[in-house]
Image (cartoon, rainbow, N blue to C red):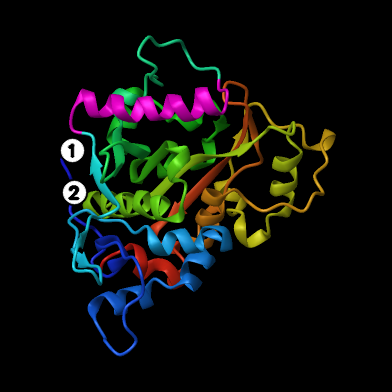
């Protein structure tokens, strides 16, 4: 797929990057946009840790140039695109390998080019977030649309969960996977850029549901993951008719599940916008993570945030 235009016309944070503060006595479009994407909104979505960075590192596809007080034009922070050829897919796969294998220690198949490759890649669309200065891919998702899932005969999630109760939803859902961000660019702005691309994709193809495995680190042996799962409220869990069942469950009864924990930023963001958790944690031995199945219905996005992700 070729580069996409900005999908969120109503959410101008994806149109420009700002530095510095506007003069108090001078109202401008820049000032209005900065007010819209306030620290308060960033904090609600991603927590205090990410609020400041999310304000100052904003995302662009077709940028509106903003002049600094000294009169120079500031280049946009990021661009959003979809891989259109094999080389671009390899860029995503290389970032995935760097994050999952080199950084997290995942046991991935050996690859001479340092790529994370599996059989699903050929059926997926690959979302790319590039740093505008270096043009390096710094964030990625892969998306498996329903007609491609039918071709391959399953979802990636089928390998970790029994999805029998969700079978009737398969024609209208897309599966998200292999989400990762370069270690030097882990700010709320990159997550927002990824979601911007996904929002446009869902609207363009009239899909209704996003499904995927959200990973929880297991560096402590699983106590964090067990505690996080136990802390979920009824409102954050999907109804029982939408539950999935781990094929290799995390042994919750043998772990300390009473720790006070905060969700990883991506899961926290999912829950804030209205996603539901559909399962207990499954252990993924290759990635050494605890995965929970996460579902987001577009019709159930939190109204507080819906206007920020979808054009009117």
The residue drawn where x is 39% and y is 30% is 95
- Hey, which quadrant is residue 214 in on the image? top right
- Of 74 and 191, the residue lying toward us: 74
Mark 1 element type = loop
Tell me the quarter of the image containing the C terminus.
bottom left
Q: Are marks 2 and 1 in contact (CB under 8 Å)?
A: yes
Q: Does residue 141 show up?
A: yes
Task: Tell me if mark 2 has few (under 14), some (14-19) or many (20+) residues whose alpha carbon lies within 10 angstroms of its own.
Answer: some
In the rendered image, the residue lying farthest to the front is: 70
Residue indicated by mark 2: 4
Mark 2 element type = loop
Give percent across and percent down for residue 195: 37, 52
Let me know if residue 291 is in the magenta part.
Answer: no
Give percent across and percent down for residue 28: 24, 81
Give the magenta part as a residue range. 84-106
Q: Does residue 144 show up?
A: no
Residue 18 relative to residue 263: left or right: left
Q: CA distance from mark 2 to mark 1?
A: 8 Å
Query: Where 97 sits versus 145, above or below?
Result: above
Residue indicated by mark 1: 1
């Amino acid at each position: 797929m070729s580069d996409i235009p900005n999908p969120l016309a109503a959410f101008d944070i994806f149109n420009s990057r700002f530095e510095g503060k506007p003069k108090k006595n001078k109202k401008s479009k820049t000032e209005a946009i900065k007010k819209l994407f306030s620290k308060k909104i960033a904090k609600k979505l991603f927590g205090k840790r990410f609020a400041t960075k999310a304000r100052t590192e904003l995302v662009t596809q077709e940028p509106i140039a903003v002049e600094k007080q000294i009169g120079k034009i500031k280049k946009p922070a990021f661009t959003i695109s979809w891989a259109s050829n094999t080389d671009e897919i390899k860029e995503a796969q290389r970032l995935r390998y760097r994050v999952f294998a080199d950084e997290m220690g995942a046991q991935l198949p050996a690859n001479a080019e340092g790529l994370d490759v599996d059989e699903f890649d050929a059926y997926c669309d690959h979302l790319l977030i590039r740093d505008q200065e270096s043009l390096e891919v710094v964030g990625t998702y892969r998306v498996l649309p329903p007609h491609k899932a039918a071709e391959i005969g399953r979802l990636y999630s089928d390998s970790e969960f029994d999805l029998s109760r969700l079978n009737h939803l398969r024609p209208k859902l897309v599966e998200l996977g292999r989400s990762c961000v370069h270690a030097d660019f882990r700010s709320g702005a990159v997550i927002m850029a990824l979601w911007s691309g996904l929002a446009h994709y869902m609207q363009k193809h009239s899909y209704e549901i996003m499904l995927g495995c959200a990973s929880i680190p297991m560096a402590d042996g699983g106590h964090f993951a067990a505690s996080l799962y136990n802390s979920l409220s009824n409102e954050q869990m999907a109804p029982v008719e939408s539950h999935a069942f781990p094929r290799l469950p995390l042994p919750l009864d043998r772990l300390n599940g009473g720790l006070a924990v905060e969700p990883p930023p991506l899961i926290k963001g999912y829950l804030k916008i209205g996603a539901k958790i559909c399962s207990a944690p499954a252990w993924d031995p290759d990635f050494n993570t605890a995965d929970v199945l996460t579902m987001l219905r577009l019709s159930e996005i939190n109204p507080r945030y819906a206007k920020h992700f979808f054009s009117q």
